[in-house]
Image (spheres, rainbow, N blue to C red):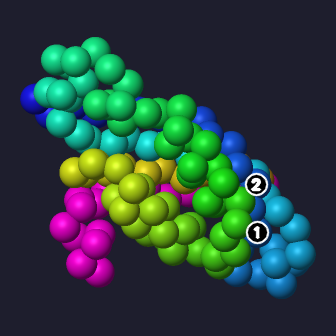
């Protein structure tokens, strides 16, 4: 029984960027996650320990991202994927990261990563 647990609009602040000035500050990011998992156990038991706990994952991702100092959003998105796959029974993952203040002429810029467990933990 495949389902998707979503988290939208996580807002960590991290050192992120390629330019010298970006290494001196923290910037706000907006992260959306869509995590594919098997709902069978949680649907049957109605117990949180059988589910992907979106509250726990939200806290984990915020804490993780705020400790990172990547240059590229691509590298950050791959690191978040590894962190989630290593901790939770997720089979496929979509991560969208927006960097809303990066390009003044754009409302927002960002990346989107789609990856499955085997690909991510192999690479
Ligand atoms: N594909 C990407 N392009 C750019 C990135 C990035 O992370 N991925 N980053 C930058 C700069 O850090 C930018 O955010 C500063 O304005 C430029 N392009």
- For label 1, the crowd category at 10 Å Cα-Cα, with few meaning under 14, some 14 to 19 and many 20 or more, is some
**Residue drawn at point x = 51 percent, y = 74 percent:** 75
Give the magenta range: 103-123
Q: Is residue 13 left or right of residue 38?
A: right
Q: Can you name the residue that lies furthest to the left here?
A: 1
Residue 35 is drawn in which quadrant? top left
Residue 106 visible in the current orientation:
no
Q: Which mark is residue 98?
A: none
Q: Nearer the viewer, residue 92 or 112?
A: 92
**Residue drawn at point x = 81 percent, y = 74 percent:** 22
Tell me the element at label 2.
strand
Q: Is mark 2 within 8 Å of ligand 1?
A: no
| Image vertical order of residue 93 relative to residue 2, above or below | below
Tell me the element at label 1.
loop
Tell whether label 1 touches label 2 (CB within 8 Å).
Answer: no
Distance of label 2 from label 1 (alpha carbons): 7 Å
Q: Which residue is mark 1?
A: 15
What is the quadrant of the C terminus in the image?
bottom left
Q: Nearer the viewer, residue 71 or 101?
A: 71
- For label 2, the crowd category at 10 Å Cα-Cα, with few meaning under 14, some 14 to 19 and many 20 or more, is some
Residue 1, image x, y percentages: 10, 29
Q: Which residue is mark 2?
A: 13
Q: Nearer the viewer, residue 54 or 79?
A: 54
Residue 49 visible in the current orientation:
yes
Residue 79, image x, y percentages: 48, 69
| Image vertical order of residue 42 relative to residue 67, above or below | above
Residue 16, image x, y percentages: 71, 69
Q: Nearer the viewer, residue 109 or 49?
A: 49
**Residue drawn at point x = 28 percent, y = 15 percent:** 46
Q: Is residue 3 magenta?
A: no
Q: Is residue 110 magenta?
A: yes
| Image vertical order of residue 80 relative to residue 7, above or below | below
């Amino acid at each position: 029984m495949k389902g998707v647990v979503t988290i939208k609009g996580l807002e960590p602040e991290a050192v992120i960027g390629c330019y010298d000035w970006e290494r001196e500050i923290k910037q706000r990011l907006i992260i959306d996650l869509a995590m594919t998992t098997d709902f069978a156990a949680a649907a049957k038991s109605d117990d949180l320990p059988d589910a992907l706990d979106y509250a726990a994952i939200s806290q984990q991702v915020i804490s993780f991202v705020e400790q990172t100092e990547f240059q590229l959003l691509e590298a950050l998105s791959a690191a978040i994927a590894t962190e989630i796959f290593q901790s939770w029974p997720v089979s496929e993952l979509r991560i969208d990261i927006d960097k809303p203040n990066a390009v003044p002429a754009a409302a927002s810029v960002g990346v989107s990563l789609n990856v499955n467990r085997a690909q991510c933990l192999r690479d």
